[in-house]
Amino acid sequence: MPTALETTHVVMARTLIVYQRERSAVWQCRYRVNRRWQRASTGEHELPKAIAKAHKMYITAEVRHSQGPPVVSYRRWRRCKPWSPRESGAPPNWPVPALQCPCLVVGRAKDS
């Protein structure tokens, strides 16, 4: 079993851990919600502030889980050439869409 480093602090047993990576001054946290571990950076350089922020992040994740939305959400973006409706030959009064890239589909990249 691996030994705990001196830069690792267990805030809540098997639920919330605050640690500092090598070559980093910022504290990271790892918390467990719905039997899955999530990792995040606290953005703090001092341990007491990092513990307080990690606890807030854990409580927020628990509340989000109890209300239904996903605990962590992200979008996968695909890099492509900038696009505008004017370049595609659309009329001048054509409304500009919210997504400025034709290869993006709400929240995920379209297969090429």
Image (spheres, rainbow, N blue to C red):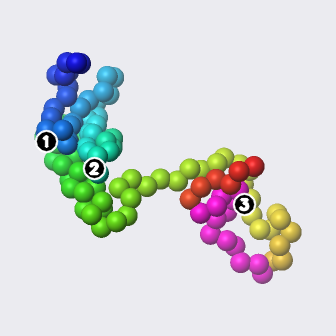
Frontmost of labels 1 and 3 is: 1
Q: Which numbered disc, 1 or 2, marks the residue closer to the eye? A: 2
Q: Residue furthest right?
A: 89
Sequence-wise first label, 2 or 3: 2
Q: Which one is earlier in the sequence, the residue at label 1 or at label 3?
A: 1
In the rendered image, which quarter is residue 106 located in?
bottom right
> Which of these two is toward me, 4 or 93?
4
- Do the residues bearing badges 1 and 2 touch, measured as CB atoms within 8 Å? no
* Mark toward the viewer: 2 or 3: 2
Q: Which mark is residue 103?
A: none
The secondary element bearing badge 2 is classed as strand
* Magenta-drawn stretch, dominant element (helix, strand or loop): loop
Q: What is the C-alpha distance between the residues marked 1 and 3? A: 46 Å
Residue 93 sits above or below residue 62 on the image = below
Residue 98 covered by magenta stretch = yes
Task: Please name whichever residue, 66 or 107, is drawn nearer the observer in this view of the structure.
Answer: 66
Residue assigned mark 1: 12
Alpha carbon separation for disc pair 2 and 3: 36 Å
Mark 2 highlights which residue?
33
Start-end of magenta stretch: 93-106
